[in-house]
Amino acid sequence: MGLTEWAYTLSESLLSDPLPRRWAHSLGVAKRARSLSPILGDDAELLEAAAVLHDIGYSPAIAATGFHPLDGARFLRDQEGADERVVRLVAHHSCALLEAEERGLRQELEGEFELERSDLADALLYCDMTTTPDGTQTTPVERLDEIVQRYGPDTIVGRFIQRATPDIHAAAGRVEKRLAQASARRQPM
């Protein structure tokens, strides 16, 4: 079984029944990851696998700390022996260090999981922040507004996402620039 096939199967087993909306979101994030293949080269499969797995830490079957990046990464590392780079992407997806700080878990996250290459971290963040909870495409502005509305501005998630907003927009801008450059290179002269 290939990396992406394994990732889809595992994510579906953990999310589809208990959290169907989270599963739809994960499928949408993975679809978005596939759309980035022109800028990912040999890492396209890796990013798609991390994209479909990024929210497995929400699964009641594996949630332990209540912080889904940490729970998901620990499960992938400890129970699945997953590819280290996939584990790192899941652990640190979408500015997770800032949310870990809000939760008092930053030292644990940093101590257990190294950061993945910034271009791949940017790509996963872009996929997550351009996909609605139902799995459809959106903009980072709309997605950030939706998160604050859903959780509330004074909650842990609300505070974290507001702090992360400049970093999210910067990462999305870097990915969009790379996509535009790749598109320009493919255009005939």
Image (cartoon, grey):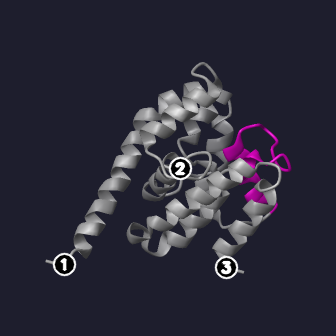
Label 2, on which residue? 131
Label 3's element? loop
Residue identified by numbered label 1: 188
Q: Camera-side residue: 137 or 10?
A: 137
Foreground mark, 1 or 3, reads: 1
Q: Where residue 37 is drawn, which disc sits there? A: none
Q: Amino acid at mark 2?
A: Thr
Q: Which residues are magenta?
A: 56-79
* Label 1 secondary element: loop
Q: Which is more N-terminal, label 2 or label 1?
A: 2
Separation of marks 1 and 3 at Cα, in angstroms: 35 Å
- x and y percentages locating residue 161 in the rendered image: 53, 32
Q: Secondary structure at mark 2?
A: loop
Q: Is residue 101 left or right of residue 119?
A: right
Q: Nearer the viewer, mark 2 or mark 3?
A: 2
> Of the residues under marks 2 and 3, which one precedes in the sequence?
3
Cα–Cα gap, marks 1 and 2: 31 Å
Q: Amino acid at mark 1?
A: Pro
Name which residue type carries label 3. Answer: Gly
